[in-house]
Amino acid sequence: MPLTPLRCRGTLAASLLAAFALMLGTSARAAVYRLPADGSLIGRDRIVHSKASDTLLGIARRYSVGYWEIQAANPHVDLWLPGQGTRVVIPGRFIIPPVAHEGIVVNLAAHRLFYFPRRGRHDAPVVITYPVSPGEKGWDTPVGVTRIVRKVPHPVWIPTASILRAHAKAGDPIPRVWPAGPDNPMGEWALETSMSGGEIYIHGTNNPMAIGMAVTHGCVRLYPEDIAALFPVVPVGTPVTIVNDPILATLEHGRLYLSIHPPLHSQDVPAKPNYALISRIIDQAVGSASVAVDWGRVRRMAERANGIPERIGVEAGPPSGRAPRRHSGV
């Protein structure tokens, strides 16, 4: 198979059978969920216990969780030596951003990608989700709507002139052409989008420990095994929607849920709570329903901003008259 050179903004320093196995939930790493008919909360958290040889980042990769997610869920667990038998929370609940549930959706603030496969007439709608690394400050991943225009196996990375200058200025010069292979910062598989003149890709990495950090030059980076599963099932022409929504709310089955992430490029430090904005997002999610909100819990969530969805309210009365799948975010 010929090598394909790419002029990608890049990063700093599987077969179809495997992909379908992942989609069917037979893989231990599978993050495949049926879309709820009411609301946009998916998944479940789980508890595991570390072995003496484990690192927190190793556990994160095992369950397709990113760097920031595993740290935020386990703030008192040592990153490198969690120790034998330590209780580790695997965050697995997510609120899908309030955009069309089609193609690929990336929420930069949550460091998460959601893929909505095409389905047959009688298939239940599902979503597959993976942790990602977006662009670092100054190399921001663009927000907007695009599409997949090309699928590139075993890419060759050709850094742009601005990337070459940045690395040279930092005393870390890099090659003008980076050949395909295990050391390529783009990994083994790349999905080209129509953004930025062919410089924004969804691709793998040669540095999986950094997945979940905002460290790329604008591309969206996945674990090697995650992009290997995603690559063969995403057709050319798939729409891609990229948003930056740190605050999300959804009302489903009479229960109101909220998640709050730190702002992108904040070094994972919670922002000063903007309660007017949070209130507006909650109001949009609630709509015309009558919901009792625990504002004390909302304040605690805003101060902590760990991204984990929590129930903050309950609808007063039966939810049957409410429109399905109402959710909100920014």
Image (spheres, rainbow, N blue to C red):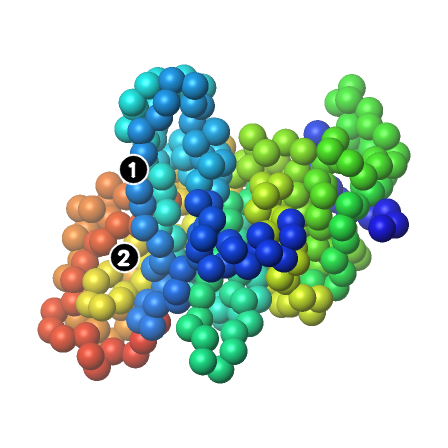
Q: In the depicted view, which residue is nearer to us: 197 or 233?
A: 233
Secondary element type, mark 2: strand
- Residue at x 47% of width, y 59% of height: 24
In the picture, measured across the screen, residue 193 lies left or right of residue 297, that is: right
The percent coordinates of residue 76 (x first, y second) are 32, 24
- The residue located at (44%, 45%) in the rendering is 28
Residue 24 marker: none
Quadrant of the rendered image containing residue 254:
bottom left
Residue in front for this viewpoint, 237 or 216: 237
Asked if residue 283 lies left or right of residue 236, the reply is: left
Q: Determine the secondary structure under disc 1.
A: strand
Residue 156 seen in the figure: yes
Amino acid residing under circle 2: Tyr
Is residue 329 visible from the viewing direction of this image? Answer: no
Q: Residue furthest left?
A: 317
Q: Quadrant of residue 218?
A: top right
Q: Few, some or many C-alpha atoms within 10 Å of disc 1 (few <14, some 14-19, many ≥20)?
A: few
Left or right: 131 with respect to 312?
right
| Rendering coords of residue 112 (x, y %) | 50, 49
Please state, as top left, top right, bottom left or bottom right, where the C terminus lies in the image: bottom left
Q: Residue at x 82, y 48 (%)?
A: 6
Q: CA distance from mark 2 to mark 1?
A: 21 Å
Mark 2 highlights which residue? 257
Residue located beneath label 1 in the image: 47
Mark 2 nearby-residue class (10 Å; few <14, some 14–19, many ≥20): many
| Position in image of residue 40 (x %, y %) | 36, 64
In the image, what residue occupies the spot 78% across and 36% down?
A: 181
Q: Amino acid at mark 1?
A: Ile
116 w.r.t. 264: above or below? below
Where does the image place residue 247, in percent across and percent down from the top left? 39, 53
Using the image, determine if residue 68 lies above or below residue 150: above
For marks 2 and 1, the one nearer the N-term is 1
